[in-house]
Image (spheres, rainbow, N blue to C red):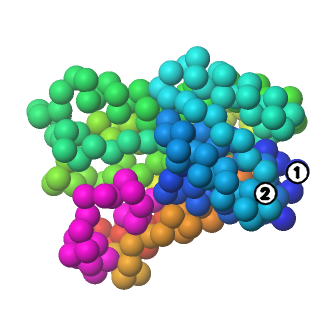
Amino acid sequence: MRLKDKVAFITGAGSGVGQATALIFAKEGAKIVVVDIDANAGNETVAMVKQQGGDAVFVLCDVAVEADIKKAIETGVSAFGKLNILYNNAGVLWRDKDLEVTRTDETTWDRVMAINVKGAVWVCKHGIPELIRQGGGSIVNMGSGTALMGFTTAQDAYTASKGALISLTRSMAIVYAKDNIRANIIHPGPVDTPMQKEWDEKTKMEISAWVPLGRLASAEDIAYCGLFLASEESAYITGTEIVVDGGIMVKGR
């Protein structure tokens, strides 16, 4: 019960890392505000949380739209009375159109930035006042190993958006430290989730062979790092980047 009596607001909680995080946080005692643009996926996560004995509410939301986020925050507070954890997990990676800058169109660039960066900004803008009312809390942002190293196969909008989240995380860690609010960011390596739907089994095997630990990350590998950062076990950690990549950054290319 590492999150007993806590309420966690999790974006992109309908699948992948977001869903795994919702389930693990609920097992550890948190009530969950499940936020997703896919109603079927979001309601499925709520049902899974309740099946394991937890409590959750779903809010349909496009994180890029400030009004949607404001309403989602209000819905979460109305349902559970407070918020303690903001978990900015929602994000998009479109390998078919997010390419190097010379081949990425303006519509793709703007939409990736709107979801991956503005989404986190709106959650924090409207969620931080709720954390302050509770005497503090934890913000966990989802970065990416791609923000820390270059790749010959570029996805520059995604990479730039995750780099922006690093700077945002550092800034919020300092600005809101006086309010006992911590902000940290996780940088996953390759994770076996629906975001990687283009990977066939051969590709997965090739990537696994490249990872020093010899496998792709599971959604739960990332979620457990998020659990640590959301809990009081990390009470003296803020403004920090945690890389969860099986050793890729140490190995290099």
Q: State the quadrant of the C terminus.
A: bottom left
Residue position for label 1: 5
Residue 54 - label? 2
Do we see residue 10 in this rendering? no
Taking the spot 37% from the left edge, 64% from the top edge, the residue there is 190
Taking the spot 84% from the left edge, 38% from the top edge, the residue there is 80
Q: What span is in magenta?
A: 188-210
Mark 2, other Cα within 10 Å: few <14 / some 14–19 / many ≥20: many
Residue 112 at x, y percent in the picture:
35, 33
**Camera-side residue: 115 or 149?**
115
Taking the spot 56% from the left edge, 67% from the top edge, the residue there is 220
Asked where in the image residue 234 lies, by quadrant, the reply is bottom right
Q: Secondary structure at mark 2?
A: loop
In the figure, 126 relative to 53: above or below?
A: above
Q: Secondary structure at mark 1?
A: loop
Taking the spot 51% from the left edge, 64% from the top edge, the residue there is 219
Residue type for callout 2:
Gly
**Residue 208 within the magenta-colored segment of the rendering:** yes
Residue type for callout 1:
Asp
Q: Of callouts 1 and 2, which one flags the residue occurring earlier in the amino acid sequence? A: 1
**Camera-side residue: 244 or 220?**
220
**Which of labels 1 and 2 is toward the front?**
2
In the figure, 93 relative to 209: above or below?
A: above
